[in-house]
Amino acid sequence: MSATRRGVLAAGLALPAVARAQTAWPDRPIRLVIPFGAGGPTDVVGRLIADPVAAALGQPVVIENRAGAGGNIGSRDVARAAPDGNTLVLNAASPLVINQWLYRDMGYDPLTAFAPISMLITGPLLVIANPRAPFSTMGELVAEARRRPGAINVANAGIGTVPHLAAELFMRAAGVQMTPVTYRITPQATQSVLTGETHLFFDSPASITHVQSGAVKALAVTTPRRFAPFPNIPTVAESGGPEIAVEAWYGLLAPAGTPPDRVARLHAAFSAAVRRPEVQSRLAAIGYEGVGNTPEEFGRAIAAEAARWGEVIRAAGVRME
């Protein structure tokens, strides 16, 4: 065989490998948008799983906090991004299933603008109170709120957030009135309970660290059954309050139209990350459990949650200022 023929044959055999290299994905860092401020539960979870996901995908995961408008700003940014799998949003429930009932124009339709990838984690809300608050159980809280309507201040991390609506749901179920105090981000609302500026907060389970340090007292978890990582903390009903069920969940989405093969690869990488034993252990320490369900399951959950919270918002008459 001549040198020329050998060279042509070698070039031909190399073409498939070159083509594969050219189409390999991801070929640049993954941008993971957190539509809330740094230090909140969504941010904590994103940073916890970023490294194992980066190892699985072979590209860095760059976290970008874009807070504002109840999570709408960062979510809208991703909804309008190129559907190539390189820009993702790690979202809480509010921008996906709640804000559509509160905002006249969010700039995107949460039920059509995204390709669901996976609900990554879930956990209860943890009802915390300042140690000097005149109640230590949900039953005592109800009694105090009935004795002094409006005198108890309950923090929230924004109108229409899950903690805000959980407090509204509780007040309606218990037949009491408390005064909502709105903060911009979760850490500010938590801090308000620590300092005594507010009496209580339906907080993310990450506030268990403040319970363990004695900085706040835990009244209840908002799940129907006790939460395994906090076996000694009663449910709202066990603590003397009404039956309510609220969970905090966080999920991963890409812009609608992202190729299914890329959605599948992202699902594999992120769901495997939340199932790693060391990640599960760290999630449990801050009150969460890894889920990692399928894109189809997550899509159905979003639709069901949207319908549920729409009913709560209409019943409570919640409106944006």
Image (cartoon, rainbow, N blue to C red):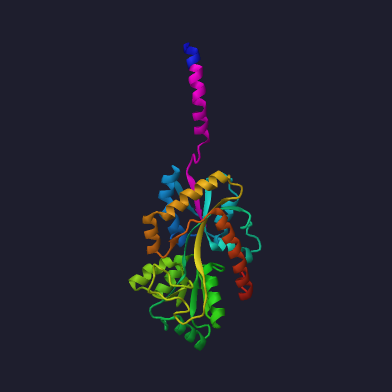
* Residue 47 in view: no
In this rendered view, identify the residue nearer to me: 115 or 2: 2
Q: From this viewpoint, which residue is outermost toward the bottom? A: 147
Q: From this viewpoint, which residue is outermost toward the front? A: 1
Q: From this viewpoint, which residue is outermost toward the top? A: 2
Number of marks in the rendered image: 0
Q: Position of residue 43 (x, y in %)?
A: 45, 58
Q: Is residue 110 above or below residue 269?
A: below
* Residue 22 in view: yes
Q: Position of residue 13 (x, y in %)?
A: 50, 24
Q: Is residue 128 above or below residue 15?
A: below
Q: Identify the residue at image location x=52%, y=75%.
A: 244
In this rendered view, identify the residue nearer to me: 95 or 65: 95
Magenta region, residue range? 7-35
Q: Identify the residue at image location x=41%, y=65%.
A: 287
Q: Position of residue 174 (x, y in %)?
A: 53, 82
Q: Is residue 112 above or below residue 261?
A: below
Q: From this viewpoint, which residue is outermost toward the left? A: 213
In this rendered view, identify the residue nearer to me: 206 or 15: 15
Tell me if residue 26 is in the magenta stretch.
Answer: yes
Tell me if residue 29 is in the magenta stretch.
Answer: yes
Locate the C terminus by quadrant.
bottom right
Left or right of 115? Residue 120 is left
Q: Position of residue 14 (x, y in %)?
A: 49, 25
In this rendered view, identify the residue nearer to me: 38 or 297: 297
